[in-house]
């Protein structure tokens, strides 16, 4: 770092979150100063296969130096890899306007050889969750979210021309494949715009462990008005299969941890949007929970599946005793894992597969195209 930049950086600790708009040195604003020499992931290739048949995904990597699961995913030779959030745990300095913890964690992940090998060979996209956003369970009121967004977009090499750079937050979408075999990837941002959650009135009580739901009449928002309009537009675009990436569980019900269930009116808005846009083939991919599970909501125009893949490392949680009325699969205690979706275009079915650290199959669930209204 150049000497003048060091002087600028030394003054940053005196700044509040609003400093992102204050010029503190000639031609250098707060965010630009912090972002000097920021790490990048290995550049990821574009998708070259004419159609997607194998998509791998995962979330929650407490140790950014752990390459075990990345090696296992590379061995599967997927067509696409999706990181569903908590890709680093850099939120241990949430009150630091320089977000030094996030910077350090991204540097460690950038130096992870197994990670670099995977993203250097396999087209890779990501969203964030709280631990790579900036503060545990944080939402739209997080003071340093604009710096966090800049860090995310820089590390993941998001091009300046990409739609994700054209608006606040990191949501974005793309579609790949020929007519009749199109897969749409819709990456939501459940952090940047989210309104505050309602704390539980009975800490750690089953079903109200940390939060209790807003009422159905609440105007609390998960995505923010602009992202909702964007999502409606994306669901109207032509595609056969639509993978909606939500860092937190959308379908899962019953537990009192972070999930769309904390804002039931917002979850119903999502279901209603799928119905009103006649969007077929919607599957939710989520992370956050440190266990793998599949939840199925049958109350829409067709069943909505939510496949949670977590964690890529660290200590998995044991959710066996949670209230989970919509859950049809839950991983065993101690199982680190990643998810894989295999699409069989010829036989019109897809398979949701949970795999372990050695690439072994822990669970597989098949879904026929007709069940989820794939044209």
Image: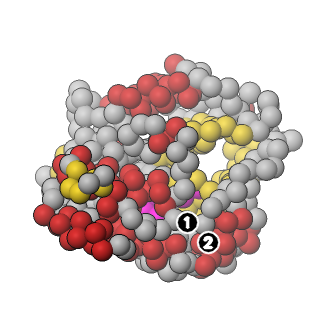
Q: Which mark is residue 49?
A: none
Magenta stretch prevailing secondary structure: loop
Label 1 neighbour load within 10 Å: few <14, some 14-19, many 20+:
some
Q: Position of residue 87 (x, y in %)?
A: 47, 64
**In the image, farthest residue toward the top:** 276
The earlier-in-sequence mark between 2 and 1 is 1
Q: Residue at x 27, y 45 (%)?
A: 140
Label 2 neighbour load within 10 Å: few <14, some 14-19, many 20+:
some
238 and 370: which one is in front? Answer: 238
Q: Which mark is residue 116?
A: 2
Q: How many marks?
A: 2
Q: Position of residue 163 (x, y in %)?
A: 52, 38
Q: Callout 2: helix, strand or loop?
A: helix
* Quadrant in which the N terminus appears: bottom left
Q: Position of residue 146 (x, y in %)?
A: 32, 49
Instruction: Please tell me in which quadrant of the rendered image residue 118 appears.
Output: bottom right
313 and 93: which one is in front? Answer: 93
* Quadrant in which the C terminus appears: top right
**In the image, farthest residue toward the right:** 346
Q: Residue at x 52, y 58 (%)?
A: 156
Q: Position of residue 279 (x, y in %)?
A: 60, 26
Q: Which residues are magenta?
A: 82-87
Q: CA distance from mark 2 to mark 1?
A: 7 Å
282 and 132: which one is in front? Answer: 132
Q: Residue at x 65, y 59 (%)?
A: 44
Instruction: Please tell me in which quadrant of the rendered image residue 215 appears.
Output: top left
Q: In the image, is residue 139 part of the stretch drawn in magenta?
A: no
Say whether residue 72 is visible.
Answer: yes
Residue beneath disc 1: 41
Q: Are marks 2 and 1 in contact (CB under 8 Å)?
A: yes
């Amino acid at each position: 770092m150049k000497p003048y930049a060091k002087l600028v950086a030394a003054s940053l600790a005196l700044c509040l979150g609003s400093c992102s708009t204050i010029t503190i040195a000639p031609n250098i604003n707060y965010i630009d100063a912090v972002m000097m020499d920021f790490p990048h992931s290995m550049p990821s290739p574009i998708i070259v296969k004419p159609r997607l048949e194998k998509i791998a995904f995962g979330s929650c990597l407490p140790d950014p130096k752990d390459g075990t699961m990345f090696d296992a995913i590379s061995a599967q030779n997927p067509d696409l890899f999706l990181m569903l959030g908590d890709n680093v745990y850099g939120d241990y300095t949430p009150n630091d306007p320089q977000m030094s913890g996030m910077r350090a964690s991204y540097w460690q992940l950038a130096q992870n050889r197994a990670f670099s090998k995977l993203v250097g060979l396999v087209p890779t996209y990501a969203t964030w969750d709280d631990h790579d956003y900036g503060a545990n369970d944080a939402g739209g009121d997080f003071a340093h979210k604009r710096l966090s967004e800049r860090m995310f977009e820089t590390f993941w090499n998001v091009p300046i021309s990409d739609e994700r750079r054209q608006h606040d937050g990191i949501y974005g979408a793309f579609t790949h494949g020929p007519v009749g075999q199109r897969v749409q990837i819709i990456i939501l941002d459940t952090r940047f715009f989210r309104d505050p959650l309602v704390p539980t009135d009975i800490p750690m009580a089953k079903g109200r462990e940390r939060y209790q739901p807003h009422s159905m009449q609440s105007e609390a928002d998960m995505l923010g008005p602009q992202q909702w309009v964007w999502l409606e537009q994306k669901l109207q675009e032509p595609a056969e299969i639509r993978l909606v990436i939500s860092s937190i569980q959308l379908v899962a019900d019953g537990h009192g941890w972070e999930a769309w269930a904390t804002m039931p009116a917002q979850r119903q808005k999502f279901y209603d949007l799928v119905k009103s846009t006649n969007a077929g083939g919607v599957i939710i991919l989520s992370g956050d929970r440190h266990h793998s599970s599949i939840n199925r909501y049958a109350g829409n125009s067709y069943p909505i599946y939510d496949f949670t893949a977590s964690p890529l490392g660290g200590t998995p949680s044991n959710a066996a005793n949670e209230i989970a009325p919509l859950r049809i699969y839950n991983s065993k205690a101690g199982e680190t894992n990643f998810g894989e979706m295999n699409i069989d275009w010829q036989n019109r079915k897809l398979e949701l597969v949970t795999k372990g650290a050695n690439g072994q199959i822990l669970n597989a669930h098949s879904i026929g195209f007709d069940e989820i209204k794939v044209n």
